[in-house]
Amino acid sequence: MNIHVFQNEQELNEAGAGIITSLVQMQPTAVLGLATGGTPVGIYEELVRAYEKGRVSFKSVTTFNLDEYVGLPEDHPESYHAYMKHHLFAHIDLPHTQAHIPNGNAADSEAECEYYNQELENVKQIDLQILGLGHNGHIGFNEPDHSLVSGTHRVELKPETREANARYFNSIDEVPTHALTMGVGTILKAKTILLIVRGADKAEIVHRALTGPITTEIPATLLQTHPHLVVLLDAEAGRLFQ
């Protein structure tokens, strides 16, 4: 486990983007696991800058997103399809056929999860998986529970998760109640995991996740079992490590 604490956001963003661009430069056909939310936005901006400067191309890369809301139209501004297009896909040369995001509007969620699992199986392994961290310790939308699902599945979002995401919507009533998410087993199968955490409100949970007992009640504690975990923290999130 490599933990890095940065004193300013720009340094963190550049470090995160540097890890990704270096991988793609060395391995043009890399498979990237992508996250959404506020955490990776600055890193995606740096990736776009690197592409615009000609330092990296994504034309042979394949991507898999962690999750998507159930029932939110793909063109809804808070869908993760729209998020990825706005923050990254519309600005780089990644072919749309190589970008995979769960279909939250599929008529049969179970069949969609099976399809997504098969697509993941076809690439064998994600080379680099980007992760954020929920206030309750969730990764992807794998919420705390007595047991966790290994593969892609439909999940009911915890009230605290919906409350945390309500800031992106007009009201909490608009926040979807369910999502499709990549499972913990798939996440842990990635060659490298890049965990990015920002903010004072995440300081305690990231410390518990990386140093506390391993438990499915805090799904992120399972990251302690991964052989190549890189953690990027801003000063506020990393204050308990200093």
Image: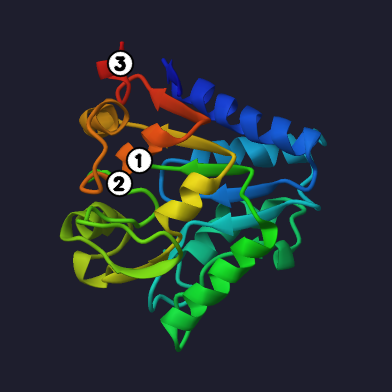
Quadrant in the picture for residue 45: top right
Q: Nearer the viewer, mark 2 or mark 3?
A: 2
What residue is drawn where x is 56% and y is 75%?
A: 115
| Mark 1 lies on residue | 222
What residue is drawn where x is 23% and y is 53%?
A: 144
**Of helix, strand and loop, which one carries label 3?**
helix
Are circles 2 and 3 on residues that touch, CB within 8 Å?
Answer: no
| Mark 3 lies on residue | 241
Q: Which mark is residue 219?
A: 2
Q: Earlier in the sequence, mark 2 or mark 3?
A: 2
Pointer 3: residues within 10 angstroms few (<14), some, or many (20+)? some
Query: The disc labelled 3 sits on which kind of residue?
Result: Phe
What residue is drawn where x is 53% and y is 57%?
A: 65
The one of 231 and 119 positioned closer to us in this rendering: 119
Are circles 1 and 2 on residues that touch, CB within 8 Å?
Answer: yes
Farthest top residue? 242
